[in-house]
Image: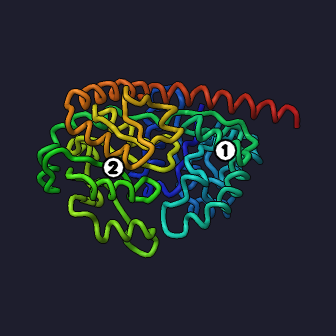
């Protein structure tokens, strides 16, 4: 089977959660008999394909199933082409109205309109994939009319191998000492930025957020505030060359995100054996167990207490980290490969039934 696994704007999303999830899909499918095509365009790109179309050549490449990971015009074109040509269509719901809010300036105001678009867009699919049962419930509430199936984003364990070797150099580079509480990823208020900074101001630990931020006109108010004038014990690193350096430099992963569909960086921190402290939200309850492989906190006071416990109890840090590593390994790319193969088979079956009844 030849599958289009498409991520428009791929070069801009390389280090985003969506980009990483798409990369995991492709790496996982490389272990199977599925042939993966990454561009839908017969000419290599939209402009070249349109030029070929003028001479009678096809606009789209040849594939047996389309799997789109974003929601923009390129994915919409693929969806329309698939529907017109009876090609099974899988749409991956990495984006929801809820996780779009509080991402950049104006995103919360746009979120309701986005929700209406997503309801229509995802409903075109033969099968919608999403990272969790929580996200499935969100999509059903819109409501999306297509079948919805959770598939883990997974974690690429090999990409984190050898992270320990980066500890000294990254701590030296960012002038980090003692127990370091850290986060990884793009700096957004939805990721719990204000809680992270207020916790830092209320404790004596070093805090570091490894990841890019936008301080320009698209930046949200909270990002401009905290990045522009952070507490003395908070470091915003900006872009880093190797994510392994972040997971090596930090000691306790603190992720007070308000909304997540799964939280790839949580699985990456767990894969490194790092104790994690998370906001008590439904998606984390779905995947993780409080006191076993993480600590879940509902208030800032609970976050403070959790950090204090971990700072004073190396055995607790070690136990949570060991259990977290086991949890992460259960989300390896072998699992992603199996779940995708099953999903593709289900999408093809539904598309065939729909074609037979037309």
Q: CA distance from mark 1 to mark 2?
A: 27 Å
Residue 254, quarter of the rendered image: top left
Q: Quadrant of the C terminus?
A: top right
Q: Which residue is mark 1?
A: 139
User: Does residue 149 show up?
Assistant: yes
Q: For this rendering, which residue is in front, 327 or 298?
A: 298
Left or right, 186 with respect to 162, comes to right
- Total numbered labels placed on residues in the image: 2
**Residue 35: where, in percent of width, then height?**
53, 34
Q: How is the image coloured?
A: rainbow
Can you say whether 315 is above or below 298 in the image? above
User: Does residue 2 show up?
Assistant: no
**Residue 176: where, in percent of width, then height?**
15, 52
Q: Residue at x 63, y 38 (%)?
A: 136
Q: Which residue is mark 2?
A: 184
Can you say whether 307 is above or below 211 in the image? above
């Amino acid at each position: 089977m030849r599958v289009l696994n498409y991520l428009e704007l791929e070069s801009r999303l390389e280090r985003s959660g969506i980009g990483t999830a798409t990369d995991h899909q492709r790496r996982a499918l490389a272990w199977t008999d599925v042939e993966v095509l990454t561009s839908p365009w017969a000419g290599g790109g939209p402009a070249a394909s349109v030029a070929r179309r003028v001479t009678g050549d096809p606009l789209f490449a040849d594939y047996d199933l389309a799997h789109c990971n974003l929601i923009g015009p390129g994915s919409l074109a693929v969806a329309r082409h698939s529907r017109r040509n009876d090609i099974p269509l899988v749409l991956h719901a990495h984006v929801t109205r809820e996780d779009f809010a509080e991402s950049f300036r104006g995103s919360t105001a746009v979120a309701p309109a986005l929700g209406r678009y997503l309801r229509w867009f995802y409903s075109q699919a033969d099968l919608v994939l999403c990272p969790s049962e929580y996200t499935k419930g969100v999509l059903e509430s819109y409501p999306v009319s297509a079948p919805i199936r959770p598939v883990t984003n997974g974690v690429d364990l090999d990409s984190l191998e050898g992270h320990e070797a980066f500890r000294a150099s990254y701590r030296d580079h960012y002038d980090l000492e003692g127990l370091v509480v850290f986060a990884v990823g793009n700096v957004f208020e939805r990721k719990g930025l204000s809680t992270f900074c207020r916790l830092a101001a209320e404790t004596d630990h070093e805090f570091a957020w490894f990841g890019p931020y936008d301080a320009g006109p698209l930046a949200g108010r909270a990002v401009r505030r905290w990045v522009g004038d952070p507490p003395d014990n908070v470091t915003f690193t900006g872009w880093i060359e190797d994510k392994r350096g972040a997971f090596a430099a930090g000691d306790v992963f603190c992720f007070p995100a308000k909304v997540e569909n799964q939280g790839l960086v949580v699985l990456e921190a767990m894969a490194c054996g790092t104790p994690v402290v998370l906001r008590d939200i439904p998606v984390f309850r779905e995947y993780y167990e409080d006191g076993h492989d993480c600590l879940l906190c509902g208030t800032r006071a609970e976050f403070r207490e959790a950090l204090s416990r971990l700072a004073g109890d190396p055995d607790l840090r070690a136990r949570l980290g060991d259990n977290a590593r086991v949890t992460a390994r259960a989300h390896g790319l072998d699992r992603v490969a199996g779940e995708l193969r099953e999903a593709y088979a289900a999408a093809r079956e539904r598309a065939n039934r729909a074609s037979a009844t037309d």
